[in-house]
Amino acid sequence: MSGIDWQQVPAAIWRSQRQELRAVTHPDPVRWDDLHGIEAQKEKLAHNTERFLAGKPANHALLWGSRGTGKSSLVKALLNSYRDQGLRVIEVDKDDLVHLHEIVDPIRECRERFIIYCDDLSFGTDDPGYKPLKSVMEGSIELPPENVRVYATSNRRHLMPEYMKDNQDTAMVNGEIHPSEAVEEQVSLSDRFGLWLSFYPFDQDTYLETVDALFPEVQDREALHRAALQFALARGGRSGRTAEQFRRAFSGEFE
């Protein structure tokens, strides 16, 4: 694995073909204040991250819920907000989690604090990647690295597929509910994330507030809102991503 100067490099991406980390020289510039409609999630994730940077106990974080609601952007904005305080981010694709030990071992003794970031995380029932992830999060015979936390985004709360049969196999024994082994396996991974942040589709007011923040100079709010709602209807939903796409399509079109 090629060396990374973590004092200069704020982030890296694991490239499995070369079995090495590639330094990120042009991070996504999304800022904390660019994200609207998810204030509660921002506050909780910032609090957890600040504890982590201060060397206090902090949780792994699972950001789950509807697409386009700011999950990935929130992690990217963290890097831009806290990189000067020693935060570093390593992005690892879900299919590359089998290499997680090779990624984490060289950074255990670094002074910087690392977030292993996995976007759109989910597993099949026979997927091997979740076992290394469990080990890095909770350790094995070796304690987990103190300077590493996992932040993952997913559309699934439990990260693994849930089937009706799994729930039907749940049994009642002496008045106590005993989940099936399949359900236990599904929940066991997501339970390792001590911080769960839920993201839902925007209601109309939140969507229009986001649009307003993206068009601060527009005077004719009625026309702006009408066009934004028509755009969201055509896209099939309201979200921060939809509002940003509307900005790209109509910036400069309103007085």
Image (spheres, helix red, strand yellow):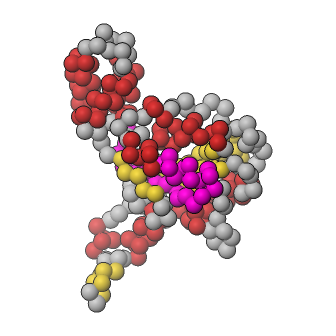
Nearest the camera: 149 or 163?
A: 149
Q: Position of residue 127 (x, y in %)?
A: 51, 62
248 relative to 114 in the view: left or right: left
Q: Position of residue 11 (x, y in %)?
A: 64, 40
Nearest the camera: 38 or 126?
A: 38
Residue 113 versus residue 83 in the image, above or below: below
Nearest the camera: 130 or 59?
A: 59
Nearest the camera: 52 or 227?
A: 52
Q: Position of residue 63 (x, y in %)?
A: 44, 50
Residue 48, magenta (yes or no): yes
Image quarter of the C terminus: top left
What residue appears at the point 44 percent right and 45 percent down from the top-left corner? 43
What residue appears at the point 51 percent right and 43 percent down from the top-left corner? 75
* Magenta span: 45-68
What residue appears at the point 38 percent right and 57 percent down from the top-left corner? 157
250 relative to 23 in the view: left or right: left
Which quadrant would residue 81 be assigned to in this image?
top right
